[in-house]
Amino acid sequence: MWWEVLGLGLLCLVALALFRPKNEKTPERKPPNPQNGEELLQLVPIHDPAVLAPHVVALWPTLDQETRKKLKEAVHAYGWEAYFITDLEDPDLEKRIRAVEILGLIGGKKSLWPLMSALASRNERVCFAATAALKELQSPGLIETLIEALGVPERWPPARVAEIILSKGRESVMPLLEKLASASPAAKGYIIEILGELGDVRAVPYLIEGVEDEDPVIRAKSARALAQINGPVMGVTKSLQQALKDEAWEVRAQAALAVGNLRIYEMAASLEELLSDPDWRVKETAEKALKQLN
């Protein structure tokens, strides 16, 4: 009878439990301790993402591009991105920060907006972690999204956003230039400042337009950005000549700075006229610019 067989089996299990040596323990799985990328790859199918995540963060700087690519493919196949996006909503602060860190390394397009939300966090640690993560993230549309965020400074801290854009280097230049004309007033000034920090000559025609803008703040920022350009600059003399006579002292001062930094020797006489400017800041900048030309 089947119930007799079942009963006999249960009795055997009970007997084994009773007579099992007391010092015999169930073997525990050793915590992972990968020393390199290859060992890490082998552990992905075996261990929980939360267990391996700290090792990914620790080993990431030592991995070459090929190993990073393989690791990202492996963890995506095992659903890591969705796993850690969910962790971003966890009440445990440490768990949220860990999720932000790992998504910056292994995340893709789906991680972009969750990390942007983390960047907007009022918690300084989360915001700082999101800044670092977005610097690492490789995702289509990342730079364009960051540029749009410059127009909403009440949500995203402009200094953090600018820091991330600057970390992308030259690849940021064209998206910035393409967005400049249609940017909101709030974003336009930030874009010009970032272009100045990048110092790319491709920005020069756009900055010349900025020097002629109707907004004195934009005119001043554009002149300052021109002063930061690295490389030969052509076609700026006329606009800067006009800027040296601008009604706003900030524009005159920044234009003088640009003339000096760009070594526009033919404008030395115009700088000399500013030595009698009513604003001391303009006079001081003109003096420094003349020293650069002499």
Image (cartoon, rainbow, N blue to C red):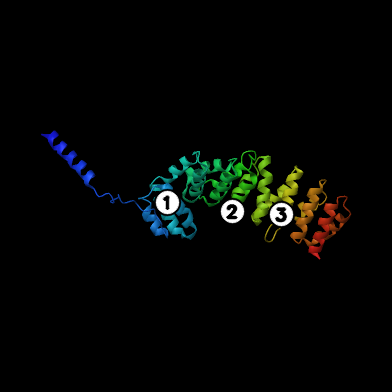
Between 184 and 66, which is closer to the camera in this rendering? 66
Mark 1 or 2, which is nearer the eye?
1
Percent of width and height locating residue 13 = 20, 42
C-alpha span from label 1 to label 2:
27 Å
Residue that badge 2 annotates = 167
The amino acid at mark 3 is Leu
Percent of width and height locating residue 128 = 58, 47
C-alpha span from label 3 to label 2:
20 Å
Secondary structure at numbered mark 3: helix
**Between disc 3 and disc 2, whose residue precedes?**
2
Give me the residue at 19% from left, 43% from top. Answer: 15
Give me the residue at 69% from left, 45% from top. Answer: 189
Secondary structure at numbered mark 1: helix
Give me the residue at 47% from left, 47% from top. Answer: 108
Residue that badge 1 annotates = 52
Q: Residues within 10 Å of mark 3 (few under 14, many from 20)?
A: many
Q: Viewed as shown, does residue 139 lie left or right of 202?
A: left
Residue that badge 3 annotates = 226
C-alpha span from label 3 to label 1:
48 Å
Between 73 and 148, which is closer to the camera in this rendering? 73
Residue 95 shows which numbered tag? none
Secondary structure at numbered mark 2: helix
**Between disc 3 and disc 1, whose residue precedes?**
1
Circles 3 and 1 in contact, beta carbons < 8 Å: no
Q: Which quadrant does the C terminus fall into?
A: bottom right
Can I make out residue 14 in this image? yes
